Image: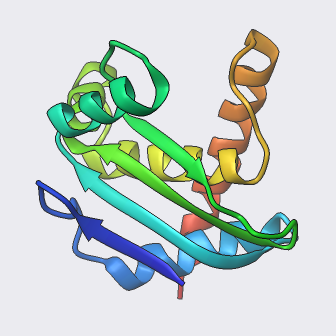
Amino acid sequence: MIQFIAIDTAVPFNNIEENRVWVDRVIQTYGRKTGEVFFLFCSDQYLYEMNLKHLDHDTLTDIITFDLSESIDFIGGEMYLSVDRIFDNADFFGISKVEEIQRVMIHGVLHLLGYKDKTPTEETEMRRQENYCLSLRSLNV
C-alpha cells in the first residue's frame, strides 16, 4: 500500500495513481514487495521540527525517512517531504518541481531499500540509482 498524505501543505501533484504505480514498480525492480509506504508532504517548518526532535539536526532538509520494514522482503516506511525545500531546490537547480519531487520521493525509497548517501562514493551511487528509478517513470501505462 502506497499512500500520499498532506500534513500542512497539499500533495504537490494530481496524478496519484501514476506515481503509486511507478513507486511500486521501482520497489519490485529491486526484488522487494511493497508493504506500507507513506509519503507525507509538509512545510519546511514541520520538517525542521521533526529534524530537531528525531535526529537532533538543527537544519532544513528535503526529506526524512523512517524505515518501518518488518521483514527483508517487504519495504515499509514513512517519508516526510518538505514541499517548500523541494520547490526551492527545483528552482535552484533549474528543473521542474515535479521532477524534483519525484527524485526526493525515490531517494527515500532507495534508503528503505538499503542505499546510503553519507560518503562521496555512496552519494554517487545514490544519484545513479535515482536516475535509473526516474527512467522507470516512462514505463507507466
Of the 4 image quadrants, the one containing the N terminus is: bottom right
Q: Quadrant of residue 76?
A: bottom right
The answer to which of 115 and 45 lies nearer the viewer is 45
Q: Is residue 43 left or right of residue 53?
A: left
**Percent from the top left, x then y, of residue 36?**
57, 76
On screen, residue 136 above or below 51: below
As drawn, the residue found furthest toward the bottom would be 141
Rendered residue at 19%/59% (across/down)? 7
Q: Residue at x 12, y 55 (%)?
A: 9
Please, is residue 64 above or below residue 123 in the view?
Answer: below
**Number of dots carrying numbers:** 0
Rendered view: 140 above or below 58: below
- Res. 75 image quadrant: bottom right
Percent of width and height locating residue 22: 56, 73
| Residue lying farthest to the front in this orientation | 53
Residue nearest the observer in this picture, 138 or 19: 19
- Where is residue 48 shown, x and y percent of the image? 27, 28
Quarter holding residue 74:
bottom right
Depth check, front residue: 76 or 98: 76
Q: Position of residue 132 (x, y in %)?
A: 70, 50
Q: In the picture provided, is 66 more to the left or to the right than 43? A: right
